[in-house]
Every structure is written in structure tokens, then in C-alpha cells.
Image (spheres, rainbow, N blue to C red):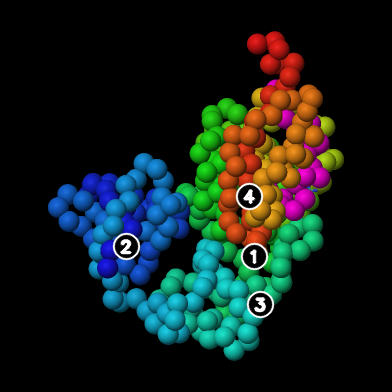
Amino acid sequence: MAVPCVRVKRSAGELTRHRLADAGLLAEQWDLDAEDEYVYIPVSDPTAVPEDLTVVPYDPPVRETQTMPADVLGTEPSYERLGDLAIIDVDEPEHEQNVADALWKSDLPIDGVLNRASKVKGQTRTRDWDVLRGDSTRTVHREYGSVFALDLDEVYFSPRLATERHRVIQQVTEGEHGFDMFAGVGPFAIPMAKKGATVVGSDVNETAIEYFRDNARRNGVEDEVTGIVGDVRNLASEYENWADRIIMNLPHSANEFLDTAVQLASDRAVLHYYDIQHESAPFEPGETAIRNAAEPSYEMSVETRHEVRTYAPHEVNIVLDVELQRVDSTEAE
Ligand code: SAM
């Protein structure tokens, strides 16, 4: 059976396998294979593979020795991997136990199975969890070569946003100033610093900022990032006219923080604005809100309108990349 595989020269095989493993992109049900001068590495999400790598269809050997959850359950269960945890979203108690059993008895390298027990809620956007196997909600997760320690019981984190974060981080240039207004444990801010930016991240959740600082150390960028505990609206005056790139990942209420974003923006800044809207017109409310906050001091131009994922039936999580240019500086050019 042909599956998407990254094809590289044998000499680059080991390095590439590590890169793909760090990005969580290895398809574990197949083994890699070598033919002529090439190695074929099966990948789980070909759209997330870095652009410098070539993806081709290839028929790799099935990993016979591994027992996968589907072998135990009889059907393929839906789950996400976060570090050494498997995360499921199952309502029926009996099915919940069967899925947890299948994951636990499989050969997947996991130390716990968690079921979502509530929606994300409150200002910290955390949720309740049922710990079905193992004994902890804490883990260390790898994403595109960065490591993030976190405790899901105390902080927000979604591995589903890995590809989107990578899209933004690829735009970062050496020496720029980045401000992540809702920073969590640092999955935007820390890779931005690794690309040479000086980054400030703020969060009302004190535990998230403790992890943010710990993660900065784990990734060797503690001198390039500053984590601040508090409501970003109360911190912005210290960083007025400072930020060249601003991340606003607080969908549902980011519009309430646009005056603060404008306050933070330097003469020419890029805003990455996340929103959740009805699929019929997902971009318009955000564009209007940004225009109202930015004009007349700034001219705005929308560089990207992108659907990140489906959030709920007929609701989509979107991002707008918007360039803000201060009007005075335009006239001066
Ligand atoms: N950017 C992180 C990520 O991608 O994992 C976290 C995003 S999470 C959706 C939003 C974060 O904003 C939460 O960690 C929450 O505690 C924080 N937050 C909510 N209101 C805030 C405010 N007024 N000022 C600063 N942080 C806030």
C-alpha cells in the first residue's frame, strides 16, 4: 500500500528521521525503507512536512512487531499524542475504558491516557481531565525541534496547532521584536527566539509563565525571552511602540485586546490574529475590528486569510496575518 513518505539520500536519512520525529510527523505503523541511493520515511501528515523535503508515495514495510491500538480495539480509535500522553475525547464510559485499554496495551510509547472531561473554560482556557491510565497530567512534548514541559491540568496547550505555529515561526526574522500577548507555556515565543527574535510573552496564568520560563531554559533561549505574569492590558505601556510581530492567540475574545495590540505595535508590525467565527464569513469580523482599532494611526493590509481548522459544526478557527504601518512613517518615506 502506497503511503506518503519523505524521500532523502541515504546520507541524510538519520538526520531527517530525527527532524520528522521532533515534529511528531513519523507514521509509526510503517518502517522506513531504503532503495537504491534513497531512504523512504513514512509520514503521518504530508502537508506539515517542511518545504525543503520531498514527499512521494511509496509502499513501505508494515511494522509487524508493533501492536497498534486498532489491533486491540478492532477499529482505529481517534486520539492525539502529547509527549508521553495519549489524549482522547470519548463520552460513553464503556467505550472510554475500551479505548484507554487499547492505547495502554498497544506498543505506543505512552505513560498515560487522558480523556477530555470539559470544554476549555475560564480566563486560563484550561479544562478538566479524567486520568484513565497512568497518574499524571504533566508531560514534556516535542514540536518542530523545541521541547515544552507542561501540566494540562494547569495550563492550556493544543498539539493540533503545531502546523499553524510553524507557519508563523517560519516568517520570523533575526533581530525582530516579538510580543506574544497570550503566551501560555511558550510554543510561539520560544521557537521565535530560536530564530533570533527578542520575545516578550505575557499570560494571566502564573503557572503557565513558570513553564514558559522553564521551557525557555530547556530550549537555550532564556536570555532572549521575557515572561510576564498579568493581564496584557496592564503591561502594554512598558512596551509601547516596541513589537514588530504580535501574536494574539485568544480566539473568541481577541477583539477586546486590539487597542492593546496597536499600543504595542512598532511603526511597521505584523499581527497574527486568531478568531473563531461562522464558516459563512469567518474573516470579516476580525478585519473590521482590526481596522477600527488601527485606523487612522496605522494603515492596515491583510497579508493572509487562513482557516486553521474546523472548531465546531459550521464554526472555523481562522488566522489573519495583518501588516500595520504607522501613517506618519508612510508619509516620511
Ligand atoms: N499561545 C498559547 C498556545 O498557543 O498554546 C496559549 C493560548 S491559550 C488559547 C490563551 C492564553 O491566554 C491562556 O494561557 C490564558 O491564560 C491567557 N490569557 C487569557 N486572558 C489573558 C489576558 N487578559 N492577558 C494575558 N493572558 C491572558
Give the class, few, some or many, for how many residues have Cα within 10 Å of label 1's Cα (few <14, many ≥20). Answer: few
- Residue behind mark 4: 318
- Quadrant (top left, top right, bottom left, bottom right) of the C terminus: top right
Sooner in the amino-acid sequence: mark 1 or mark 2: 2
- Of tags 3 and 1, the one toward the viewer is 1
Q: Amino acid at mark 3?
A: Asp
Sooner in the amino-acid sequence: mark 2 or mark 4: 2
In the rendered structure, which segment of residues is drawn in magenta? Answer: 248-267
Front in this rendered view, residue 130 or 44: 44
Q: Is mark 2 within 8 Å of ligand 1?
A: no
- Residue behind mark 3: 130
Is the residue under label 1 in contact with that under label 3 (CB below 8 Å)?
no
Sooner in the amino-acid sequence: mark 3 or mark 1: 3
How many angstroms separate mark 3 from mark 1 (CA)? 25 Å
- Of tags 1 and 2, the one toward the viewer is 1
- Quadrant (top left, top right, bottom left, bottom right) of the N terminus: bottom left
Q: Secondary structure at mark 3?
A: strand
Q: What residue is at 77 percent from the left and 31 percent from the top? A: 294
- Residue behind mark 2: 3
- Residue behind mark 1: 313
How many angstroms separate mark 3 from mark 4 (CA)? 29 Å
Give the class, few, some or many, for how many residues have Cα within 10 Å of label 4's Cα (few <14, many ≥20). Answer: many
Q: Amino acid at mark 2?
A: Val
Sooner in the amino-acid sequence: mark 3 or mark 4: 3
Give the class, few, some or many, for how many residues have Cα within 10 Å of label 2's Cα (few <14, many ≥20). Answer: some
Front in this rendered view, residue 172 or 287: 287
Q: Secondary structure at mark 1?
A: loop
Q: Is residue 209 visible?
A: no
How many angstroms separate mark 1 from mark 2 (CA)? 29 Å
